Image (cartoon, rainbow, N blue to C red):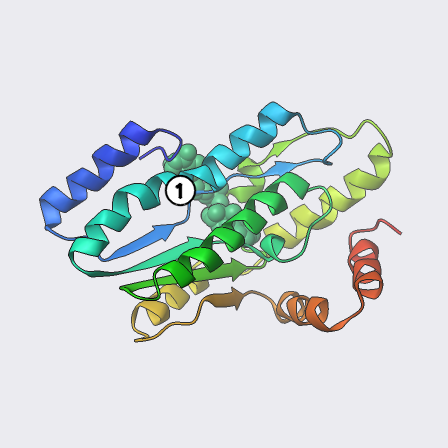
Amino acid sequence: MDVRDSASVKDAVAYIVKKEGHLDILVNNAGVGIGGTVEDTSTEMAKALFDTNFFGICRVLQEVLPVMRRQPEGLIINMSSIGGIIGLPCQGIYSASKFAVEGLSEALYKELSLSAIKVVLIEPGDFKTEFTANRQNVKAKHNADNFQRTMDVIENDEQNGQPPFKIAYLIERIINTPRPRLRYAVGAPDQKLSIVLKKILPNRWFDRIIMSYYQLK
Ligand SMILES: NC(=O)c1ccc[n+]([C@@H]2O[C@H](COP(=O)([O-])OP(=O)(O)OC[C@H]3O[C@@H](n4cnc5c(N)ncnc54)[C@H](OP(=O)(O)O)[C@@H]3O)[C@@H](O)[C@H]2O)c1
C-alpha cells in the first residue's frame, strides 16, 4: 500500500481481511527522512514527510482498528526513532514527525487500555538500511560546512549501524509477550544511554553533549 493514499490503504486492509479472515498485528513501519536544517526545509517538503511518517499511521489505524475491535484483539507496533525522543540537528522535521508518533501512540495506548488491543512504540537508534540513500537532502544556506559535518556524522552512524534483523527479533519478542510495555528502545549502548541521560541531566548539559557529538560546537 501507499500510506499517503487513503484508497490504497483501504484496499490493502480489505484484501488482507478477505484473504485471511483476521488481522492480528499491524507494524506501522513506513518512513522517510529529510537531511537539512529546519530553516532550509520548505513547508511543502515538511508536509510531504508528515504525510508518510505521521498521517500514514493515522490512515492505517482508521482502517485497521475497526477490524481489531471486531476480533476483538490485536497488536499495533508504531516505528518511532531515537529522533522521536531527542530533537536531532539536521533532522528537525523528521524528529518532529517521530515526536508526533510518540504523542499519538501514548494517547492511543491509554484510549485502548479498556480493550484487548495493545500499542507498542519501537525507538531504534542507527540501523543500516536504505534510509540514508532514500533520504532527501537540503543544502544549508548558512554555515554549510558546519551542517555538512553534522550530516557526515549522521550518515556515518547509519552506515555503520546495527543490522535490521535485530528489530525483527525484537518484534518477534514483543508479539510473544503477553503484556508488552509501551516503549522499546533498541540500538547501540551509547544511543540507549543518551535516552537515559536526556531524562536525568539538566537540559543545557544534555544539549551540549548532543551538539558536541554532531560537531556543532
Ligand atoms: N534506519 C535507521 O537508522 C532508523 C532509525 C530509527 C527509525 N527508523 C525508522 O524505521 C522505519 C523503516 O525505515 P528503514 O530504516 O528501513 O528505511 P528504508 O530502508 O528507507 O525503508 C523505508 C520503508 O518505508 C516504506 N515506505 C516509504 N514511504 C512509503 C509510503 N508512502 N507507503 C508505504 N510504504 C512506504 C518503504 O517502502 P518502499 O521500499 O516500497 O518504498 C520502505 O519499506 C522508518 O519509519 C524509519 O523512520 C530507521
Q: In this view, which residue lies farthest toward the right? A: 217
In the displayed structure image, the side of residue 168 where residue 40 appears, left or right = right
Residue closest to the eye, 110 or 196: 110
Q: Quadrant of residue 78?
A: bottom left
**Residue 77 shows in this picture:** yes
Tell me where residue 196 appears, x and y as whole percent.
66, 72
25 over 8 or under it: above or below: below
Q: In this view, which residue lies farthest toward the bottom? A: 178
Residue position for label 1: 58
Q: Quadrant of residue 71?
A: bottom left
Mark 1 neighbour density, 10 Å: few (under 14) some (14–19) many (20 or more): some
Q: Residue at 27% of width from left, 64% of height from top?
A: 115
Q: Residue at 60% of width from left, 57% of height from top?
A: 82
9 over 123 or under it: above or below: above
Residue closest to the eye, 170 or 16: 16
- Say which amino acid is labelled 1: Cys
